Image: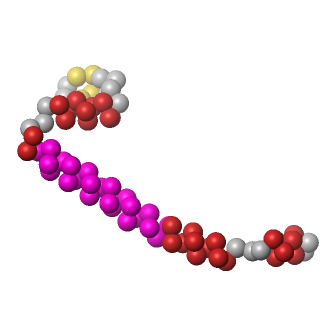
Amino acid sequence: MAYDGIETVMSKREMIAHELDHMPEQDLDKLLAYLRSLKEAHAENAMPALAAQSSLAKEWLTPEEDAAWASL
């Protein structure tokens, strides 16, 4: 993977850590705010799926209903 004209085999995490070492302190506040907004966006996107799972769990068949369907 080429990065700034240098061939590297660093992972993305290593590349990010390298960039952090060279980033001005005032930019770290902006970066931290951005990272937190990404984390919150992922959490908000996961909420509908979690709600759907609990709703579906209420609609699952009981063991007796499963047995009745299996015998059909």
Question: Which residue is drawn at the image coordinates 57% and 71% (left, top)?
Answer: 54
Q: How is the image coloured?
A: secondary structure
Seen in the picture, residue 36 relative to 2 is either above or below; the reply is below
> Most prominent secondary structure in the magenta stretch?
helix
Question: Which residue is drawn at the image coordinates 54% and 72% (left, top)?
Answer: 52
Seen in the picture, residue 60 relative to 37 is either above or below; the reply is below
Name the spot of residue 29 as percent of width and height, x first: 14, 48
Q: Is residue 28 left or right of residue 45?
A: left
Seen in the picture, residue 17 relative to 37 is either above or below; the reply is above
Name the spot of residue 8 as percent of width and height, x first: 30, 23
Quadrant assignment, res 14:
top left
Q: Is residue 59 magenta?
A: no
Q: Is residue 26 left or right of residue 49?
A: left
Name the spot of residue 72 as percent of width and height, x first: 90, 74
Query: Does residue 69 appear in the picture of this structure?
Result: no
Question: Which residue is drawn at the image coordinates 18% and 48% (left, top)?
Answer: 31
Q: Give whichever of 48, 2 is nearer the camera.
A: 48
The number of callouts visible is 0
Quadrant assignment, res 65:
bottom right
- The quarter in which the N terminus is drawn is top left
* Magenta residues (range): 27-49
Seen in the picture, residue 7 relative to 27 is either above or below; the reply is above
Q: Is residue 33 magenta?
A: yes
Query: Does residue 49 appear in the picture of this structure?
Result: yes
Quadrant assignment, res 68:
bottom right
Question: Which residue is drawn at the image coordinates 51% and 67% (left, top)?
Answer: 50
Q: Give whichever of 5, 39 is nearer the camera.
A: 39
Name the spot of residue 55 as percent of width and height, x first: 58, 75
